[in-house]
Amino acid sequence: MKAKCAVNARTSLAPAIDWDAVRRDLAGLNLVTAPGQRKQLSKDFFWYSPILTAQLSGCVAELVVKVGTEDDVRQVCATAAKWKLPLTVRAGGTGNYGQCVPLEGGLVMDVTQLCRVLDIGDGRMRVEAGARMHDIDLAARETGQALRMWPSTWHVASIGGFIAGGFGGIGSFRHGILRDPGNLLRARVMTVEREPRVVELAGDEIQQVHHAYGTNGVILDVEVALSPAVDWVHCTVLFERYRAALDFGIAASTPDLDLFLLSTVEARFSPYYTAMGEHFPADRHAVFTMVAPASMEDFRALAAAHGGHVALAGTEAELLAAGLPPAYECAFNHTTLQALKMDRGWTYLQVAYAQPFDPAVVERHLEIFGDEVLQHQDFARAGGEAGTFGILLVRWTGEARQYELIREIESQGGCKIFNPHVVTIEDGGMKTIDTQQIEFKKRSDPMGLMNPGKTRGWTADMATEG
């Protein structure tokens, strides 16, 4: 018996669809009909959350379409509009919140073959939405430039998915978050109508589709900012006390040091970092960083002043040659992944701390939560100001306890939880409806077909014939 999606069931109330006719309208495209493949292409990394696993495991598209050109996308959008089919866009599927899971079935459009580099200029790069971010960076480095930021999953993650579902990532310590001015330059978006249109967005207009979970238009290609390439030194600094590691993170958050990444990870993560070996022993807390070569002398001096020992330093090529992971694979949500590879009894929470960051808040959490919660903090910039975020490893003992932890963490110290156990944009972190995105959705997806169920800002009465 086919499992049911536990979130929404609008399709069960909709008129029957003539899927043979739908397939005829999609003639010439790469259609995936096999149940196993459809199921696989209807998933992302929502399994990080036991709550989402229970809700989303039965959500499967009736049909998956793989596209490779803009004309392919236009054909899919027109077909979805003609038959009023839910349409969900996916690429690498590395998101953690079910962003590309079709809650109401319908069509999934896989854009991973829409992956060409269209243009590279001074300080900018235009690429199709399905391009993998690591591939993009390699192309940029051939011109002496590099991406400003990317997720730790950049070998699989696409640029379109990063913009549609991401917030920041590796490089946010230096360049801020995606939303900050100058990071996203332009985007071209296809509407979902019987006669689809291409809308061009520039500058702040891109916020209409950024972090919108693909609910209001199909991103075709984007232009992002580049910076001069740096051969970063990947460092691991060890500390006897976690407070010392946090104090070092605060001290290193200065313009005097040129850093691309700065993350603190407590010692109890060590057993899950099997590739690190003696470079991350079980009795030491670690700080993982990417440091510009010109800043290494000052970086070492600052680490020593805080009681830290630089246990590992090398370029990415040097670390990989030695069988060691680069620093970015030891930070951000890769910390969660390291643990889940060995023990699926964990899940996680995301925290934004009040600024200026007070390490005493983390010390309090260490004391009251004990072995139930392991601490990991990422330092970044947002809106030009320093920011500190936590991706906490949490022992799973049930949904009720998970929400008790959320309430406790938010009760003191000005902490704000970005909840990874929900599927809507607003409940996950935004907390409010982005009216700018909803107004754009009315123009770009007038029937409300795109990724339904992912935004509380859209209601059925808003739908019109497109």
Image (cartoon, rainbow, N blue to C red):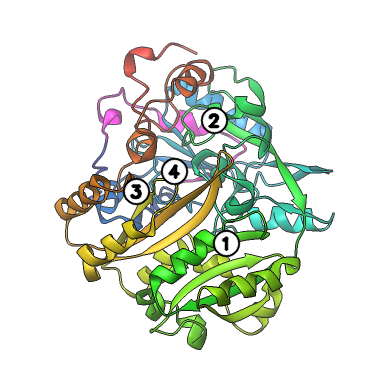
Mark toward the viewer: 4 or 1: 1
Q: Nearer the viewer, residue 227 or 264?
A: 264
Q: Amino acid at mark 1?
A: Ala
**Residue ID for mark 4:** 100
Rendered image: mark on residue 420: 3
Q: Earlier in the sequence, mark 3 or mark 2?
A: 2
How far is mark 4 from mark 1, CA to CA?
37 Å
Nearer to us: label 4 or label 3: 3
Between disc 4 and disc 2, whose residue precedes? 4
Q: Position of residue 122 (x, y in %)?
A: 84, 43
Label 4 amino acid? Answer: Cys
> Vertical placement of 452 versus 363: above or below?
above
- Residue drawn at x 45%, y 82% is 274
Above or below — where is 122 with respect to 27?
A: below
Which residues are drawn in magenta?
A: 8-32
The reply to whether discs 4 and 2 touch (Cβ–Cβ < 8 Å) is no
SS state under label 2: loop
Question: Nearer the N terminus, badge 3 or badge 1?
Answer: 1
Q: Is residue 42 magenta?
A: no
Image location of residue 380, percent across then percent down? 53, 52
Mark 2 nearby-residue class (10 Å; few <14, some 14–19, many ≥20): many
Residue receiving disc 2: 209
